[in-house]
């Protein structure tokens, strides 16, 4: 019973967020250290990874103007989906690349992949692939894409059935004004 209540609460929260997005929900924009968010997502996902190996791939440092909570929600959604669709012993790799005008974050898995007929629809609300035996509402990827677009970015995906998928989040770098100083990380000392 508690599991069903939790599931219904998540559905209601997702629907409320999408409704607010449709009504023009504004984001709390501030300088965001993406490498820190990725590390948080990695640590959180490791707890629920079960028999799937989750790892950090390439990790540049990058600061953008964004809403840290929403970006973390987006990345957790992508990583959680990858973990759900990757068999035991498979891999999910989270990477961050800083390019001249964009920041590129990839979530790559060695899961079952997405059928070519399903790919054009995966970001639609309530869409679930016909061969998908995993639980879910079909709202997560549309929320993730909305968050990406609200940041001036987008999510793209490549996939091969039986080999896995790579979801790529593209975010514009743009100018970032620091509103506060922060202590150096130990790795910078």
Image (cartoon, rainbow, N blue to C red):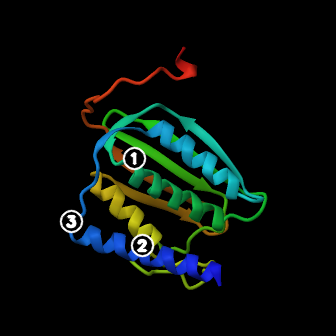
Do we see residue 120 in this rendering? no
- Residue 118 percent across, percent down from the top left: 49, 77
Element under disc 2: helix
Q: Quadrant of residue 56?
A: top right
Q: Which residue is mark 2?
A: 14
Q: Which mark is residue 24?
A: 3
Residue closest to the eye, 139 or 12 = 12
Q: Earlier in the sequence, mark 3 or mark 1?
A: 3
- Residue 187 percent across, percent down from the top left: 57, 21
- Residue 175 percent across, percent down from the top left: 24, 33
Residue at position x 24%, y 57% in the image = 26
Question: Does the CB distance between marks 3 and 1 fall below 8 Å?
Answer: no
**Neighbours of disc 3 within 10 Å: few (<14), some (14-19), many (20+):** few
Which residue is most to the left? 24
Q: Which residue is mark 1?
A: 68
**Neighbours of disc 2 within 10 Å: few (<14), some (14-19), many (20+):** some
Along the horizontal axis of the image, is 174 left or right of 170? Answer: left
Q: Is residue 108 above or below residue 1?
A: above
Between the residue at mark 3 and the residue at mark 2, the CA separation in whole angstroms equals: 15 Å
Q: Is residue 73 above or below residue 105?
A: below
Do we see residue 78 in this rendering? yes
Between the residue at mark 3 and the residue at mark 1, the CA separation in whole angstroms equals: 18 Å
**Neighbours of disc 1 within 10 Å: few (<14), some (14-19), many (20+):** many
Q: Earlier in the sequence, mark 1 or mark 2?
A: 2
Q: Which mark is residue 38?
A: none
The N terminus - image quarter: bottom right
Residue at position x 25%, y 30% in the image = 177
Q: Earlier in the sequence, mark 3 or mark 2?
A: 2
């Amino acid at each position: 019973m508690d599991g069903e209540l939790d599931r219904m609460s998540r559905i209601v929260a997702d629907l409320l967020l999408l409704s607010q997005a449709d009504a023009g929900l504004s984001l709390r924009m501030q300088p965001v250290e993406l490498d820190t968010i990725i590390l948080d997502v990695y640590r959180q996902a490791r707890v629920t990874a079960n028999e799937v190996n989750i790892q950090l791939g390439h990790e540049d440092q990058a600061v953008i103007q964004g809403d840290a909570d929403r970006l973390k929600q987006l990345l957790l959604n992508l990583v959680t989906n990858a973990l759900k669709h990757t068999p035991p012993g498979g891999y999910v790799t989270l990477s961050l690349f800083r390019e001249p005008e964009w920041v590129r974050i990839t979530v790559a898995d060695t899961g079952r992949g997405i059928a070519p007929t399903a790919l054009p629809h995966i970001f639609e609300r309530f869409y679930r692939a016909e061969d998908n035996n995993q639980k879910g509402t079909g709202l997560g990827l549309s929320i993730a894409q909305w968050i990406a677009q609200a940041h001036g970015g987008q999510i793209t995906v490549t996939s091969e059935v039986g080999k896995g998928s790579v979801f790529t989040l593209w975010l514009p770098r743009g100018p970032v004004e620091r509103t506060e100083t922060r202590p150096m990380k130990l790795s910078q000392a």
